Image: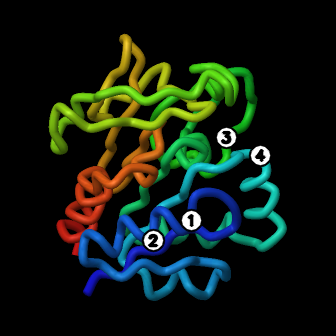
Amino acid sequence: MLKIGVLGLQGAVREHIRSIEACEAEGIVVKTVDQLTDLDGLIIPGGESTTMRRLIDKYHFMGPLKEFAASGRPMFGTCAGLILLAKNLVGYDQSHLGLLDVTVERNSFGRQKDSFEAELMITGVGEDFVGVFIRAPHIVEVGEDVEILSKHNGRIVAARQGQFLGCSFHPELTNDHRMTQLFINMVKESK
């Protein structure tokens, strides 16, 4: 059985575990660096990216997360996780992990009160996927090796580059597990 970790420092962790298990893989809440060793793939969940970065630094995850990526194992960033994966951030000189060749703008759909759901067409998933957008970022531009998977109102909200998958929305907050299944299929392909 595939072992899919969810970085468990902050954010929508339990919901991702539920979605992973619905896709018949083992979901593991990752709280220590040592747990990364046994994983086949890793999800960096939505939450608050500044808080998550502080915790990544406090618990010495930065180097091991980059090593995890360098090993070729897939990583999936949702909402704040997308911000952490992105190579560039609008208005900031420095990225976090800098793995996915995209430029991301934080909170680009508005504040918490502006949260919404939207039906999306996602390549490899389908055309009726409901995305839950909460203080969501969006992808402003992509590198040449990046495949755009979905747009909402002209804004890029999902993309893939090799082993990296990122989306602006929270796929784990619905009972539709197709986005998680897409990631798990990436993990299977990588093995």
Mark 2, residue position: 17
Foreground of the two, 86 or 49: 49
Task: Name the residue at 16% across, 43% down.
Answer: 124
Q: Is residue 8 above or below residue 133?
A: below
Q: Nearer the viewer, residue 48 or 59?
A: 48
Quarter of the image with the C terminus in it = bottom left
Circle 4 SS class: helix
Pointer 3: what residue? 95
Disc 3 versus disc 1: nearer the observer: 1
Q: Earlier in the sequence, mark 3 or mark 4?
A: 4
Report the Cα–Cα distance between label 3 and label 1.
23 Å
The relative height of residue 65 versus residue 115 in the rendered view (above or below) is: below
What whole-number distance in Å separates the C-alpha atoms at marks 2 and 1?
Answer: 6 Å
Residue 72 shows in this picture? no
In the picture, the disc for residue 13 is 1
Mark 1 Cα shell of 10 Å, populated few (<14), some (14-19), many (≥20): many
* Residue 122 location (% of width, % of height): 23, 35
Residue 36 visible in rendering? yes
Residue under label 4, please give it: 50
Residue at (33% x, 44% y) in the render: 161
The amino acid type, in three-letter code, at marker 3 is Ser
Q: CA distance from mark 3 to mark 4?
A: 11 Å
Q: Position of residue 20 (x, y in %)?
A: 35, 69
